[in-house]
Amino acid sequence: MTDTDRRVSGTIHVRGEGGPGDGAWAVLLPPGRYDAERLVHHDTLELTGLDAAGVAYRAGAALAGPTAPASPRPAGPTAPAGPRPGDPVAVLTEGPLRLVALGRVARPTVERREDPDDPQSDPAAGSLVVAYTRRAFDEPVAAEGLTLDGPVTALPAGAYRELAERLGPPPARRRWLVSLDLPIEADTPAEAVRLFWSYVRDLGPQELPAFVSPSGNELAMQAFVLGAEANQDPEEDD
């Protein structure tokens, strides 16, 4: 479980002189992407289709708070350049707006070109890769007071720090035992293994319960389906 023990309430406001040139960014997950990112561990988040009219990279944030009235970011030539490798990123989801991860802009593992048949053509615009540094998908943190103008928004450094502080310190890592048991009918052990992986591939985490317990405390085992705890005792459902 991702730790979000220390919470900070209230609206987010700008500290000091942090502004669009500080190189921090807010990235909004597309609809449905939150569940996918929560369900399977990914080292990176890759978003595409961000170059429509250049809106994504030229958009800005308006931060409302008791000491900072809302003020939209500039657009056009005065706006900050797009995200660069190493820039800090706050990953958020809507409905309501919540912080679900932190990361840094990374270089794409496969660089796409405007002309796929010409390796010397310019790199294609519209893709962004974020390498995760902290996840909070299991317990998102409220990000009230932050207004985003697009999928990728320049974020003042002060606002980014306040978002990061809401996560609190990272939890101590511990060892877990995760298992998936399926009764398989087969002629040979090898065939049983093949059928096992076929079921895992076809049913996946949407239907198959995985059982997890702290190492050394198997009595605390819990079943998870779709990334959430799920009761597997039919008698308790009655």
Image (cartoon, rainbow, N blue to C red):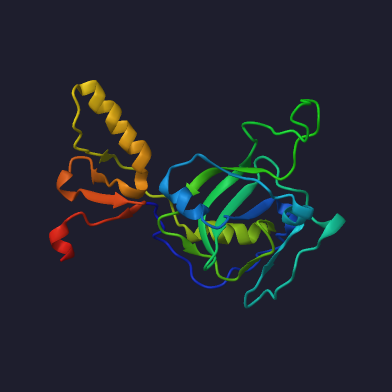
Against 133, residue 72 (above or below) is below
Residue at image position (26%, 27%) is: 193
Residue pictured at 47% horizontal, 57% vertical: 167
- Left-right relation of 184 to 138: left
* Residue 135 appearing in the image: no
Q: Position of residue 12 (x, y in %)?
A: 59, 68
Horizontal side, residue 212 vs residue 155: left or right: left
Give the answer, above or below, for where 13 lies relative to 135.
Answer: below
In the current view of this chain or complex, which residue is farthest to the right?
A: 77
Q: Quadrant of residue 168?
A: bottom left
In the image, residue 190 lies at what x, y percent?
24, 21
The quarter holding residue 58 reads bottom right
Please say if 12 is above or below 171. Answer: below
From the top left corner, tell me how far across and down residue 143 is, in percent: 54, 66
**Residue ID at (65%, 36%):** 107
Q: Quadrant of the C terminus?
A: bottom left
Q: Nearer the viewer, residue 224 or 79?
A: 224
Q: Residue 60, percent across and down? A: 72, 61
Q: Residue furthest left?
A: 235
Vertical arrangement, residue 230 with respect to residue 61, above or below: above
Residue found at the far bottom of this picture: 66
**Snapshot quadrant of residue 26:** bottom right
The answer to whether residue 205 is visible is yes
Number of callouts: 0
Looking at the picture, tell me which residue is in the foreground, 238 or 6. Answer: 238
Which residue is depicted at the point 70% across and 34% down? 112
